[in-house]
Amino acid sequence: MTKILILNGAQPYAFAPGKLNEAFTERARTALTAMGHEVRVTTVAEGYDVEAEVESHQWADAVILQFPVNWMGVPWVFKKYMDEIFTAGMDGRLCAGDGRTEHAPKANYGMGGSLAGTKYMISATFNAPREAFDNIDEPFFQGGSVDDLLRPVHLNARFFAMSPLPTFASFDVMKNPEIESDFARFDAHLARLFAEAEHVAA
């Protein structure tokens, strides 16, 4: 059995109340529980206890970060969560400071993480279409990928020595949604990553 923490980082707005990210969160909870995993879920916008969240990160074998991409990053409420939980965990529970030592004060920045062996997976929803990414002819992202855009999220996880699982993305969700297709891809993505992980562990 794998212990999985799911973080729903959506910030509800009148124009985007967060129902899709809630649906992905619940879909992951149901699927992973059915696979035999132990699952905890935090819905960030509903509030949280900082110490409990630090403990959940220590507890987890894998963390799923579910969020809509707002202005090229995570929603402000999710950034606030990260600021509070990650800072509290810098006492050695999530990392030992920033990785530098008094003997080498200029080396190994960001390499003090305490969560080696913990995996993480980003699952993000976008207003942007799939075609906006990985295409040098598209002028905005200039050939960049989803993971290029979300590099700060990846670096946050790396700061704690977590290692990435393949990212999932749902595109064009405001103007041209393909929700049932996205759900089917999401289910297959989870099954591929976590059913295989369970089989290997067994």
Image: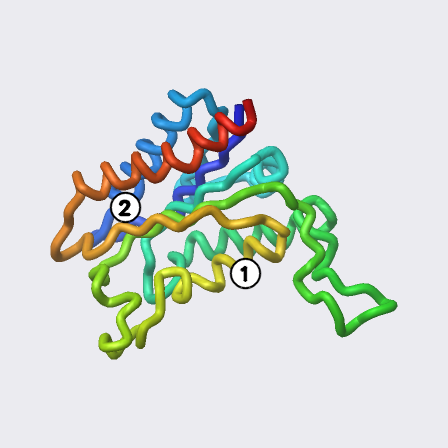
| Mark 1 neighbour density, 10 Å: few (under 14) some (14–19) many (20 or more) | few
Assign the C terminus to one quadrant of the image: top right
Vertical order, 135 against 4 (above or below):
below
Res. 11 visible in picture: no
- Secondary structure category for the residue under label 2: loop
Mark linked to residue 155: 1
Q: Residue at x 73, y 58 (%)?
A: 97
On the image, the x and y values in percent for residue 65 come to 43, 46
Can residue 185 be seen at all in this image of the molecule? yes
Residue at (72% x, 66% y) in the render: 108
Give the image quarter of residue 102.
bottom right
Seen in the picture, residue 34 relative to 25 is either above or below; the reply is above
Foreground: 104 or 58? Answer: 104
Q: Which of marks 2 and 1 is nearer the N terminus?
A: 2
> Residue 27, image x and y in percent?
31, 32
- Residue 97 is left or right of residue 104, and the answer is left
Residue at the extreme front: 200
Disc 1 is placed on an element classified as helix
Q: Which amino acid is tagged 1?
A: Leu
62 left or right, relative to 191: right
Foreground label between 2 and 1:
1
Give the residue type at disc 2: Gly
Residue that mark 2 sits on: 18
- Residue at (17, 55) in percent of width and height: 174
Q: Nearer the viewer, residue 183 or 188?
A: 188
| In-image side of 198 versus 189 (left or right) | right
